[in-house]
Image (spheres, rainbow, N blue to C red):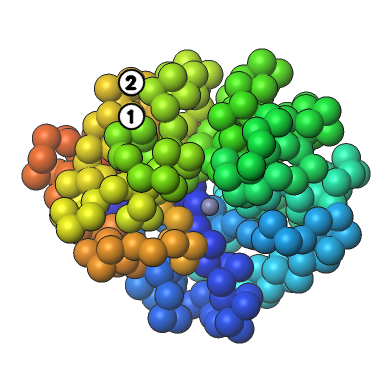
Amino acid sequence: MRLFDLHCDTITELYGKKGQLKHNGGHISLDRAEYLEEYVQDFAVFIPDELRGEEAVKYFDGVYSFYKEQLLENENLTEYKDRKNSKFKSILSVEGGAGAGGKIEGFYHLRDCGVKLITLTWNGRNELGSGCFDDEDIGLTDFGREAVKEMERLKIVADVSHLSKKGFYDLEKIAEKPFIASHSCCDIVDNYKARHRNLTDDQIKIIAEREGIIGVNLWEKLLGNGNDNSFEAVRRHISRIIEIGGEDCVAMGTDFDGCDINEDLRGIEKIKDLYDYLGCHGFDEKLLDKIFFANGDRFFINFI
Ligand SMILES: [Zn+2]
């Protein structure tokens, strides 16, 4: 099987722990991904909500240097944009538009570092607008609108995961290119986190109509799996996205190393079990490949 994962926090997590991508005890290590025939991983530099302005840029630069080191240390991992024939490919993203430091020039710096996707906000408010847990939802700021336009020009994908509802509709009004939800689930779960983080049917419809994609998150709170089998919970979310937006908009956005995941899904080696489960529950091979790889690959080839 092939995997194209739209979101993980592995590089940020390893930076903090001084770990190595090749082998570690977290959710993703390259040695445990060997079974995949082809593997594209989006690695997010996560910007905490406490960091703004220059502090956020400095933090990004630190994680970025570590990311480059890891690329040098692993010959079988190359950047997706290089189109080299390596088994593993990486895409660099920033989780939190604060990584631009509140200046338009900051986006040029991120582009120069090879960033291909920016999650506009994390949970709180930043210079671009309100995150999904902001006390008051102000949507996108004027700077946020300007930032989205500049990102489109620089061929950086806008990501609505963590964005507030008002922010989403502000983006819909101004975006000329498709946008994505890199790690989100559907509005079929009723708990506090899921109500704010998951996508409504209307949001799924809009993302799909704009030819964007949605990566299904494996976080137990968003899946709402409780004591239930996690594979079945993922199946329900994928089926809902297909029902509303069609087969071409659903992808994987594991959120590995960024959240709590039930044991049956915890780790890159468990993706194969999920793939097999779905294969036994009505998903044919072509559809499975779309979900796990081809939709993500098509989107990024067209966008960047
Ligand atoms: Zn996240």
Which residue is depicted at the point 61% across and 83% down?
18
Q: Quick check: 72 left or right of 242?
A: right
Q: Classify 207 as above or below 93.
A: above
On the question of residue 278 being in view, the answer is yes
Which residue is depicted at the point 57% across and 41% down?
132
Q: Which element carries disc 2, helix, strand or loop?
A: helix
Which mark is on residue 244? Answer: 2
Which amino acid, mark 2? Answer: Ile
Which residue is depicted at the point 70% across and 31% down?
138
Q: Classify 133 as above or below 92.
A: above
Q: Nearer the viewer, residue 116 or 267?
A: 267
Disc 1 target residue: 241
Q: Which quadrant holds the C terminus?
A: top right
Q: Which element carries disc 1, helix, strand or loop?
A: helix
Task: Give the farthest residue toward the bottom.
Answer: 18
Q: Residues within 10 Å of mark 2 (few under 14, many from 20)?
A: some
Q: Nearer the viewer, residue 274 or 30?
A: 274
Percent position of residue 161, x then y: 54, 41
Task: Give the farthest residue toward the front.
Answer: 135
Give the CA separation, mark 2 to mark 1: 5 Å
| Mark 2 in CB contact with mark 1 (< 8 angstroms) | yes
Q: Classify 231 as above or below 20.
A: above
Q: Quadrant of residue 294?
A: top left
Which mark is on residue 60? Answer: none
Q: Residues within 10 Å of mark 1 (few under 14, many from 20)?
A: many
Percent position of residue 289, x then y: 30, 40
Percent position of residue 190, x then y: 32, 40
| Label 1 beta carbon within 8 A of ligand 1 | no
Q: Quick check: 245 left or right of 71?
A: left
Which amino acid, mark 1? Answer: Ile
Percent position of residue 9, x then y: 53, 62
Q: Quadrant of residue 237?
A: top left
